[in-house]
Amino acid sequence: MTSSSSTTTARTSSEARAVARTQTLIKGANGIGTVRKTTLPGGLRIVTETLPSVRSATFGIWAHVGSRDETPSLNGATHYLEHLLFKGTSRRSALDISSAIDAVGGEMNAFTAKEYTCYYARVLDTDLPLAIDVVCDMLTGSLILEDDVNVERGAILEEIAMTEDDPGDCVHDLFAHTMFGDNPLGRPVLGTVNTVNALTADRIRRFYKKHYDPTHLVVACAGNVDHNKVVRQVRAAFEKAGAFKNATAAPIAPRDGRRSIRTAGRVELLGRKTEQAHVVLGMPGLARTDDRRWALGVLNTALGGGMSSRLFQEVREKRGLAYSVYSYTSGFADCGLFGVYAGCRPNQVHDVLKLCRDELDQVAEHGLSDDEIGRAIGQLQGSTVLGLEDTGALMNRIGKSELCWGEQMSVDDMLARIASVTPDEVRSVARDVLGQRPSLAVIGPVKDKQASRLHDAVA
């Protein structure tokens, strides 16, 4: 992260004689890739990345709230609220919101995670003022009407049903519960049928007012944009809505969390009449702020991140035991997960699990070869750059970085950090992470007599 300049500008507003603080966080050559940040009175942060060569812009607002912030009875409220913010404001109906973006050929969506929520619109650069006005209106002026809550309940219940019909997706929720148990990180982001049915408009409105204060929000915009214009338009939209209640309020700090991972060695089975058994074998990983995360990323890539990875070669290419097999990492504020997924025929579950466990144990004990590590570093660098080839991905990067880390890292710095990972660092993190006793989640037609053998996979 670099900070090359800092300026302060004053403006008279209705709530105070406001002072906005602007910084250049990353200075790109000829302005390309320049990342600037303005913090408005009232605690709203606005971060932009400028790419003059493109004709699009993606505008998003990140909220510092996810399913991790829910009590058991509120499970699913964050995602429910995400749906409801599209249902209308005092200025626009639900149709007005969607048709405004459709009319200019743009796209609009949102997503809810365990530690944050994001709303965004991608449009032509000339239509950016419209996108800003619509998204800001949604975030600051949603009505949360009881009729809308009741209508949307049906859509969310269908979404839960759709997820449960996809065991390849559902098994990851089961694995999270296996690792974290009945606490917020172990509960599904969508909630359950019972919790969604119990949520009322009044409870969701209170949740909205508590978590959508400007101090909890980060505005992110990337593309052919002018930072100062974006700041003026966002500020005007929030002031019009009367969103700035306290001009001296400071932005909320990045989440630090409370370590809540459970003891390893647990097994959870969910019987389903499916053609495949879906399995996730894994263990505690690293928090997203852990310096070893770069080495873990290289390890993950080499172990299960591509067609040349160990797991893909051993499970699919050499033996044809699965079509899909991969490893992945999930980092939260204070903890993380490392998992291996495979989908296979039910009668081959034990063979697949033994192969996966053997590979994890072997890498934990002996590490990876220098050639594997070098290939993984190159693959990770390439996928990092290719994954940032559109303005939506850039908006995600700067928005999440501000919300979760409170700082920005240039792409060149990211590539340099990946390149600096040493074989010893990879072997060390392999011992620390893969050397732990794993846990297991399985969805499929698993018979009782198979269940005891599945416990052997984590013994």
Image: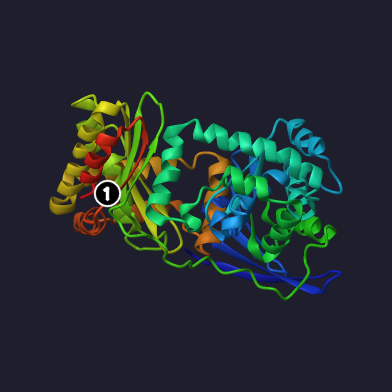
Q: Nearer the viewer, residue 364 or 55?
A: 364
**Badge 1 element:** helix
Q: Position of residue 287 (x, y in %)?
A: 39, 60
- Vertically, is 167 above or below 199? above
Q: Which of the pair 44/378 is nearer the observer? A: 44
Q: Is residue 396 left or right of residue 156?
A: left
Nearest to the observer: residue 392 or residue 182: 182
Estimate how packed mark 1 is, as few (under 14), some (14 to 19) or many (20 or more) residues with alpha carbons within 10 Å. many
Identity, as a three-letter code, of the amino acid under mark 1: Leu
On the image, the x and y values in percent for residue 327 come to 32, 42
Query: Is 339 positioned to the left or the right of 110 in the image?
Result: left
Q: Quadrant of residue 67?
A: bottom right
Q: Give the vertical position of 253 relative to 160 (above or below).
A: below
- The one of 60 and 30 positioned closer to us in this rendering: 60
Q: Position of residue 344 (x, y in %)?
A: 30, 28
Q: Specify how the rendered protein is coloured.
A: rainbow
Residue found at the far front of this picture: 448
Task: Provide residue 107's location: percent of width, then percent of height.
Answer: 66, 35
According to the picture, the residue beneath numbered tag 1 turns out to be: 299
Residue at 77% x, 54% y: name it: 233
For image coordinates 26% across by 32% down, the residue present is 349
Image vertical order of residue 384 relative to residue 45, above or below = above
Quadrant in the rendering for residue 130: top right
Taking the spot 53% from the left edge, 56% from the top edge, the residue there is 115
